[in-house]
Each structure stands twice: as C-alpha cells, then as structure tokens.
Image: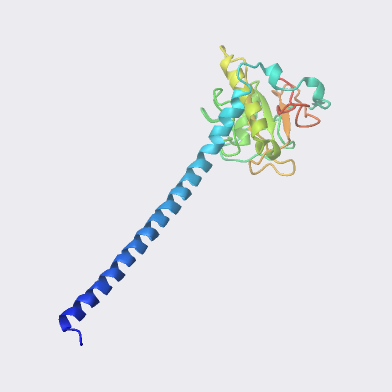
Amino acid sequence: MAKSSKTEKSERRQVIDDIRRKQKRADKRQGMAIVGVCVVVALVIIGAALYPKARDIVNDQKWKGKSVAEIGAGADVCGDITEKEATGSGEHVPEGQQVDYTDAPPAFGAHWNVAGVAPTPIGDRFYTADSRPELEALVHNLEHGYTILWYDKTAGDDSGELSAMRAIAKIMDANDTNQRLKFKVAPGPPPTSRRPASPSPRASTSPSPTGASTRTPRSSTAPGSTAPRSAAPP
C-alpha cells in the first residue's frame, strides 16, 4: 500500500531533523575541541611567560641571607692583574657619539657627560643585555670610582650565574648607606667588537681608572657553586 504524501513529508522531516541534530552535535564537539586547544595554548603561553620569573625567584632564594664573600669566589681564582695608564678619563664626547675603546670591556676612556644618563644612577646596580646602558655612559661611572662586574653571553644564558651576580648587586645596594659601595653588574661587549651589547668576557671586573687595572677570572664557576668566579669588589 502506497504511503500518503503526509506520511512521506513526516518521514523526510524526521530524517532532516536527525541530520540537523547530528550536525549540531558535531559542531558542538568541534567547538569544544577548539576551545580546549585555545585553553592549552593560552596555558603554554602563560607558563612560558611566568617560568623565567619563577625560576629567578627560586634561584634568588638560594642566596638569601648570604654575604658577598659567600657568593663570589675569592681573589685567588683571578688571573694576573693587568695595569694600564688610564687615558681619556676626563674627556667628554657628545651624547650619541660612539667611542672605540681599546679594551673590551673598557676600564677607562672618553665618555658621555649627561645628567641622569652618564654616569648612570647609582641605584641601577644590575643590567641585562636588554637594559644595559651604552658603554660611554658606564665608562663615566668608572671615572667616578665605580667597580663594574662585566659578564659574557655564556654567563648571561646561565640563570644560576645571573642569580648569583644579581644577589651581589642587591647586597651592595642594601648595604650602601652613604653611596660608597659604587658597584654595578653589566653585560660587556664581545672582545672582537665593542657593539652590540652582547656580553664578554665571562666575568671580569673593571675598577675605577686610577692607573686602571683589570682582573679576569681563569674560569667561570667555583667548584660546587654556580657563583661567577669574580673577585669580591673592593
């Protein structure tokens, strides 16, 4: 017996409704999958952003309550002191003019003289490759009796060594009640070229230019320690 047109329409409608329901369920599953992927991506991005900060906090806790002598290695790990006559220490050049220093990192030489810029503020104790001022500004700090602990890219890529140097800078800042502890930590220029601000040598100190001397450690890390092998600043 032939089906009536009404029955056929009802069956077609049911088939269409079934297809629509299945499509909605499929769309819903797809939407949930997209949301899930987005959540995972967001968590990865947030985690990647927070990880360096969390790592630094953990590393910094290792040096909490320590003295500089307990963090840095002693002077016996340093190489021989090289003494040179400081030249150009009182020579000021216009801001923006780059100076080709003989040594990398420099211990003396011509520099900028701009209030609030060169010399750099004493409260700015620790610099990264992204935050370090130009060499011409820091050399002016050397003229004013600062000691600068320069570090290279290898140390800059080592969170443990960075943490140790940052701890030294914090200790010097916390104990400097009369601005006599003139100490900074900064990435130095590579030995073959003074630009850009990618650091070198591994860890060396440039004292103020009074017949300037520079001491460079023989190696980067004390046995059983992640502290940079640099002599404690005077």
Residue 103: image quadrant is top right
Q: From the viewer's perspective, is residue 17 above or below residue 9?
A: above
Residue 174: image quadrant is top right
Q: Is 94 situated left or right of 12 in this image?
A: right
Q: Position of residue 30 (x, y in %)?
A: 39, 60
Residue at the outermost right position: 80
Residue at the outermost top position: 178
Residue 219 visible in the current orientation: yes
Name the foreground residue: 146 vs 37.
37
What residue lies at 84% left-to-right and 26% top-to-bottom?
80
What residue lies at 17% left-to-right and 83% top-to-bottom?
5
Q: Quadrant of the N terminus?
A: bottom left
What residue lies at 66% left-to-right and 39% top-to-bottom?
157
Residue 119 visible in the current orientation: no
Residue 198: image quadrant is top right
Q: Position of residue 72 (x, y in %)?
A: 71, 22
Colouring mode (rainbow / by chain / secondary structure / one colour): rainbow
Q: Quadrant of the C terminus?
A: top right
Q: Position of residue 219 (x, y in %)?
A: 79, 32
Q: From the viewer's perspective, is residue 218 above or below residue 130?
A: above
What residue lies at 58% left-to-right and 33% top-to-bottom?
55
Name the foreground residue: 26 vs 59.
26
Q: Position of residue 54 (x, y in %)?
A: 54, 33
